[in-house]
Amino acid sequence: MAKQGECFPIVRGLYEPERTVPGYLLAGSIYGPSYISFDYALAYYNLIPETVYTITCATFEKKKKKRYETMFGTFIYRDVPSEAFPLNLKIVRENEYFYRIAEPEKALCDKLYTMHPVANHKELFELLTENLRIEKTELCKLDADKISFLADHYHSGNVRKMASLLRRMKR
């Protein structure tokens, strides 16, 4: 079927009948369990201004970062803590496809979890607003209670600082 153009290879043993399907719809099938997160989800929610072409996904207990180059796009998978993995996800249906994506707060927690630790709130604010280029008004829209809840499951100083920074910003 692939030789006749009736289906298209994604990765070994996995095929897609539709050549023009957006890659993010296939992310959960390529390597899993996984969900869309990190930069791709932050861009999806318009938290970062850049357009992100690489589909970034979270997994757990895989021990190493995986990268797949396919005709549908580039996919990167990296670990988050297993106890944080199932929390604050949305299942989205798009036509006959379903995919999982982190809520905005979780996508930011995933991103912060993978970044070098910051020393204090000032450094974290600079990281968020200058390095990631998230607008202060967008940060203030995030739910501090969700981030506090998630912080208990990441065991990450960056995520704990994010929860307290948001509370300070909303005072």
Image (cartoon, rainbow, N blue to C red):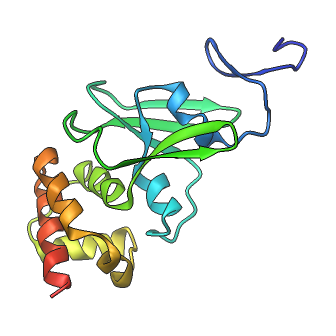
Please state if 148 lies on the left or on the right of 35 as rendered: left
Please state if 52 lies on the left or on the right of 159 as rendered: right
- Front-lying residue, 148 or 53: 148
Residue 86's image quarter? top left
* Residue located 23% across and 76% down the image: 125
Residue 28 in the image: x percent, y percent? 51, 32
Residue 51 in the image: x percent, y percent? 58, 62
- Front-lying residue, 155 or 64: 155
Residue 48 in the image: x percent, y percent? 45, 68
- Front-lying residue, 26 or 126: 26
Using the rendered image of the protein, determine whether residue 23 is visible from the camera's viewpoint: yes
Residue 61's image quarter? top left
Which quadrant is home to the N terminus? top right
Q: Residue furthest bottom?
A: 171
* Residue located 10% across and 56% down the image: 157
Residue 126 in the image: x percent, y percent? 25, 76
Is residue 108 positioned above or below 31 on the image? below
Which quadrant is home to the C terminus? bottom left
* Residue located 70% across and 43% down the image: 95
Q: Residue furthest right?
A: 4
Please state if 60 lies on the left or on the right of 29 as rendered: left
Is residue 131 positioned above or below 101 on the image? below
Is residue 149 positioned above or below 145 on the image? above
Using the rendered image of the protein, determine whether residue 117 is visible from the camera's viewpoint: no
* Residue located 55% across and 56% down the image: 52
Q: Please give the count of numbered marks on the rendered protein.
A: 0
Is residue 57 positioned above or below 29 on the image? below
